[in-house]
Image (cartoon, helix red, strand yellow):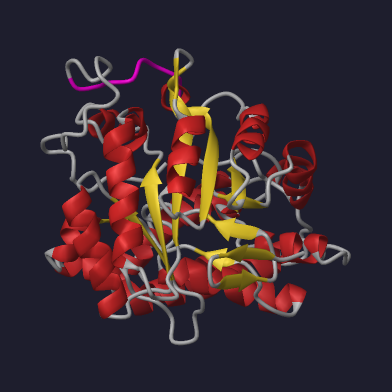
């Protein structure tokens, strides 16, 4: 099963969702290695951590470091957070001119209060005219190139203010090569259940470009079921791969009509953790890399009988040598546990969405919100 996004032809309809502090070059490399080792090839799209358009244009060192891709990584996919058409154009033009990536995605799904209260993230598609100008700016900057632009958004702000059908229509009209829907509102954040019916509605509403579904895909069976139930053209996987970089091998096999590879034993997981640590150390340096690894270890060991003392020590690990010692204490023969299946990562609670004063008064107001182009985590 293939998926075409503009000039890109993917051999699997699976996209790794950009996640702040997770989908850096180390994690993407690990996911690709696992797919090759367990499924024989890489076939989907692995998206870089989200960066702000403003920070990219200003060439802030931390942002430029986030745009690192592996030497054999292809296609290179980069997601932008943006609120300003002019900055959007400059950032997309820079990506093209400097050959920074092969694909640009734009994030309009972040539900974090400090972002929405300034009019960014999931709040912005409510302003239809501004949303249109931003998408058009990115597409204009990439005209005549092989770099497609795609757009990701949520169902809306809350149950009373759905925006996804307008957002999908506008994005397609302005030249986006595909759209992706996280089937929750901003008020849900990551809580509750994603409403896949809204993905089906978007697919019926947007017929000119591929529609991708996102939300509550924690297994290959979930991905197949989403596509069967909604008719969507592909799936975007976020929290389901936390501590499970081999999930993409399972997805690749399933969509290719092959048997899914056997989940790894604890010994195999230990090897994967060690490889992840090595890649993080290469990217960030050993000190920061091992600090970054700590949150991943908790996800990797979920459901395994590792013991509370060892888990605590893993959460404080500082060096590769120390990590090797701790991993050596795990029982390598323990099979992958059923307790490790299901939802993972942040969930939180639903709540009212913080918005700028008067934000809902005029959806055709195309003024750029003040101070909304700050770095934040994606959604």
**Left or right placement of residue 54 versus residue 334 in this view:** left
**Residue 322 appears in the picture as rendered:** no
Q: Residue at x 42, y 27 (%)?
A: 186
Q: The C terminus lies in which quarter of the figure? A: top left
Percent position of residue 305, x then y: 68, 49
Left or right relative to 22: residue 138:
left
**Image coordinates for residue 251, horizontal then vertical, percent:** 73, 59
Q: 309 or 108: nearer the eye? A: 108
Indicate the position of residue 133 as horizontal and vertical percent values: 28, 45
Q: Residue at x 75, y 52 (%)?
A: 220
User: In the picture, residue 356 is in which quadrant?
Assistant: top left
**Left or right of 62 on screen, residue 294:** right
Q: Identify the residue at image location x=52%, y=48%.
A: 179
Percent of width and height locating residue 340: 69, 46
Q: Nearer the viewer, residue 55 or 135?
A: 135
Which quarter of the image is occupied by the N terminus? bottom right
- What are the residue bounds of the magenta stretch? 348-356
Helix, strand or loop: magenta stretch: loop
Residue 148 falls within the magenta-colored stretch: no
* Residue at image location 58% in from the left, 68% down from the top: 31
Figure disc tally: 0
| Location of residue 229 by image quarter | top right
> Along the line of sight, which residue is nearer the eye, 253 or 146?
146
Q: Is residue 275 visible?
A: yes
Up-down: is 204 above or below 148? above
């Amino acid at each position: 099963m293939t998926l075409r996004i503009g000039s890109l032809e993917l051999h699997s309809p699976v996209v790794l969702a950009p996640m702040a502090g997770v989908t850096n070059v180390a994690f993407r490399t690990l996911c690709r290695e696992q797919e090759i080792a367990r499924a024989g090839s890489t076939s989907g799209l692995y998206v870089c951590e989200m960066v702000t358009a403003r920070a990219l244009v200003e060439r802030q060192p931390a942002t430029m470091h986030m745009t690192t891709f592996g030497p054999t990584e292809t296609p290179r996919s980069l997601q932008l957070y943006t609120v300003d058409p002019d900055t959007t154009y400059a950032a997309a033009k820079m990506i093209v001119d400097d050959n920074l990536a092969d694909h640009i995605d734009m994030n309009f799904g972040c539900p974090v209060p400090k972002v929405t209260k300034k009019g960014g993230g999931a709040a912005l598609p409510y302003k239809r005219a501004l949303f249109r100008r931003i998408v058009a700016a990115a597409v204009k900057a990439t005209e005549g190139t092989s770099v497609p632009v795609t757009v990701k958004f949520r169902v809306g702000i809350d149950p009373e203010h759905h925006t996804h059908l307008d957002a999908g229509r506008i994005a397609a009209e302005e030249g986006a090569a595909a759209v992706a829907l996280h089937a929750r509102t901003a008020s849900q954040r990551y809580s509750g259940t994603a409403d896949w019916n809204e993905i089906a509605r978007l697919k019926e509403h947007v017929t000119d470009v591929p529609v991708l579904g996102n939300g509550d895909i924690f297994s290959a069976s979930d991905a197949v079921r989403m596509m069967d139930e909604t008719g969507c053209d592909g799936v975007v996987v976020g929290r389901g791969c936390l501590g499970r970089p081999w999930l993409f091998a399972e997805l690749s096999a399933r969509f290719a009509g092959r048997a899914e590879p056997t989940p790894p034993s604890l010994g195999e997981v230990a090897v994967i953790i060690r490889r992840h640590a090595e890649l993080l150390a290469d990217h960030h340096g050993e000190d920061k890399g091992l600090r970054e690894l700590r949150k991943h270890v908790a996800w990797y060991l979920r459901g395994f009988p590792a013991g509370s003392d060892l888990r605590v020590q893993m959460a404080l690990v500082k060096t590769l040598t120390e990590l090797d010692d701790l991993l050596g204490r795990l029982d390598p023969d323990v099979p992958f546990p059923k307790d490790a299946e299901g939802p993972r990562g942040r969930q939180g609670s639903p709540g009212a969405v913080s918005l700028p004063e008067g934000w809902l008064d005029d959806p055709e107001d195309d003024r750029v919100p003040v101070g909304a182009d700050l770095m934040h985590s994606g959604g």
